[in-house]
Image: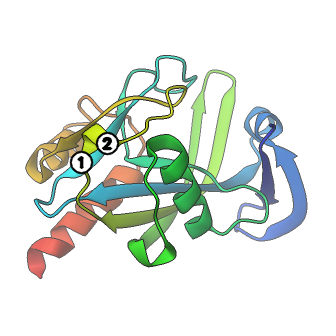
């Protein structure tokens, strides 16, 4: 099934237009994306390793889950859908905490990603041996200690995807936790 996205101008105003993923990425049309970080009671973050079949960042360690916001969806609906699809974890709106947003432009090969990004936190202890991974998206998952992920982000995304914004919001969230 072809994914269809709502299209926005550079100020984030809905243009009352939609386009396919392929058209958005080939023409550089602005659309929405979401990111979720699942953090357990030990303050570890759950990371996924991207499938070797992915066009962008194959075989790289990445955010817990995320993706594009489909036409007609709100960001929180997309997070609930993406976490279920990619990891088999069922969430409700009450499980997720919106922590911020940004814009990003990422060009790799013939893909032009122009995103309005939304970032979410899920505080949940999960036994990763019980997850149902979407193999075309995710090859494995692991818990990573807070200090290790912060070090990787600050060391030019050492061993993780170079998705600016996503990781910085996670670090900012951890800094906020430390002040509580």
Q: Can residue 117 be seen from the camera position used here?
A: no
What residue sits 54% from the left and 23% below the top? 54
Mark 1: secondary structure: loop
Residue furthest right in the image: 17
Q: Nearer the viewer, residue 166 or 1?
A: 1
Q: Is residue 103 above or below residue 139?
A: below
Q: Is residue 126 left or right of residue 108?
A: left
| Residue 56 picture location, percent across and down | 53, 27
Q: Quadrant of residue 31?
A: bottom right
Report if the CB atoms under discs 2 and 1 are less than 8 Å apart: yes
Q: Is residue 178 left or right of residue 120?
A: left
Q: Is residue 108 above or below residue 37?
A: above
Q: Which residue is mark 1?
A: 127
- Give the CA separation, mark 2 to mark 1: 6 Å
Residue furthest top in the image: 52
Q: Which residue is mark 2?
A: 130
Q: Nearer the viewer, residue 138 or 11?
A: 138
**Quadrant where the image shows the N terminus:** top right
**Quadrant where the image shows the C terminus:** bottom left
| Residue 63 picture location, percent across and down | 38, 45
Q: Is residue 142 above or below residue 146?
A: above
What residue sits 69% from the left and 23% below the top? 110
Q: Quadrant of residue 151?
A: top left
| Residue 93 picture location, percent across and down | 50, 75
């Amino acid at each position: 099934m072809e994914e269809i996205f709502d299209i926005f101008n550079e100020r984030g105003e809905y243009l009352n237009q939609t386009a396919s993923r392929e058209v958005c990425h080939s023409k550089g049309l602005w659309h929405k994306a979401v990111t979720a970080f699942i953090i357990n009671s030990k303050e570890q973050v759950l990371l996924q390793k991207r499938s070797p079949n992915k066009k962008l960042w194959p075989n790289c360690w990445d955010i817990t889950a995320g993706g594009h916001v489909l036409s007609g969806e709100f960001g929180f609906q997309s997070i609930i859908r993406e976490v279920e699809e990619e990891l088999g974890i069922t969430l409700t709106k009450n499980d997720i905490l919106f922590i911020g947003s940004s814009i990003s432009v990422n060009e790799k090969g013939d893909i032009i990603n122009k995103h309005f990004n939304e970032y979410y936190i899920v505080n949940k202890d999960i036994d990763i041996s019980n997850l149902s991974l979407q193999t075309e998206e995710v090859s494995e998952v692991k818990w990573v200690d807070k200090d290790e992920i912060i070090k990787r982000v600050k060391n030019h995304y050492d061993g993780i995807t170079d998705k600016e914004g996503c990781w910085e919001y996670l670090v900012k969230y951890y800094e906020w936790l430390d002040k509580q």
